[in-house]
Amino acid sequence: MYKMLDYHGLGPVYCDEGGDAFWEDRRGPCKKLGIALAKALRTRLPPMGRSLYVGAGVPEIPVLLMERLELNRTVCPYNLRQAEVDILNQAGGENGIHFYCGSAETATGKVDHLWIVSVLNDPEEFPNLSVLFSYGRADPLAFDVSAFSHERETGVRLFANCMAKLTLPGLLTTSVEEMPWVEHWCHLHGIPYQVENRTYPTALVGDPVCFIHIG
């Protein structure tokens, strides 16, 4: 599937400029680290289950294929960027993984695995949240408190609506930077959770990924 991707078309999706050079550099690591993460996830998921992927794109391809082909699981990957969704669906063909354009909040049914990696700290979707939480710095004179409040409410709603689809006990795959959202939701609902110590690198954003057992 990686060979079929339109990397020239993906360039503007991931970069304001220099997209071709970006993918020339990151294509190999993206595939390699994705496969490593897929191998780790494979031992943690039961066959014949169902997974919801929030903000899934090129980096998630190996994980999605592993679930579908090796574990015979149903995968529901959502992505807000129409251009990337079109490229991914074209590369996969009729028998490939089908990506949905839209918010994962609209997904129906229950899942036993939720994937939400580098979504709530995405500087494109949550510029004020990402500056304050992920990078730990913000200009006190320029920081937009109103915009931050709106983004926080949006983030809380998105995470809560997606977590509501997770059966308990269930598995959550997320980034270390997004742990505050997990802690807030679990404490609010009185639900226990266990974070595995080991983390896994990602190729594009660099956020380490961890597995969390919910319930």
Image (tube, rainbow, N blue to C red):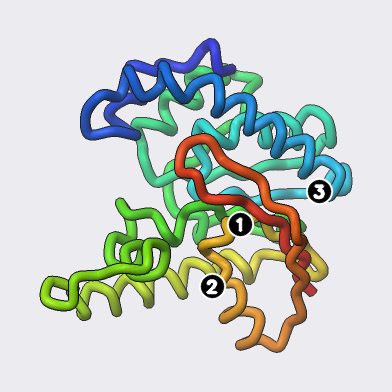
- Where in the figure is residue 30, as x and y percent of width and height? 55, 28
Report the front residue among 43 and 47: 43
- Where in the figure is residue 139, as x and y percent of width and height? 19, 71
Look at 50% across and 44% down and name the residue there: 206
Per the image, the residue denoted by label 2 is 181
Q: Report how far apart the C-alphas of labels 2 and 1 lie in the structure.
A: 10 Å
Quarter where residue 11 is shown: top left
Q: Determine whether 170 is above or below 25 in the image.
A: below
The three-letter amino acid code for the residue at tag 3 is Gly
User: Would you say residue 160 is visible in this rendering?
Assistant: no
Image marks 2 and 1: residues in contact by CB distance under 8 Å: yes
- Where in the figure is residue 83, as x and y percent of width and height? 34, 31
Quarter where residue 101 is shown: top left
The three-letter amino acid code for the residue at tag 2 is Trp
Secondary-structure class at tag 1: strand
Please tell me the numbered disc located at residue 49: 3
- Where in the figure is residue 63, as x and y percent of width and height? 68, 36
Quarter of the image with the C terminus is bottom right
Q: Determine whether 159 is above or below 64 in the image.
A: below
Q: Report how far apart the C-alphas of labels 1 and 3 lie in the structure.
A: 19 Å
Quarter of the image with the N terminus is top right
Quarter where residue 19 is shown: top left
Q: Report how far apart the C-alphas of labels 3 and 2 lie in the structure.
A: 25 Å
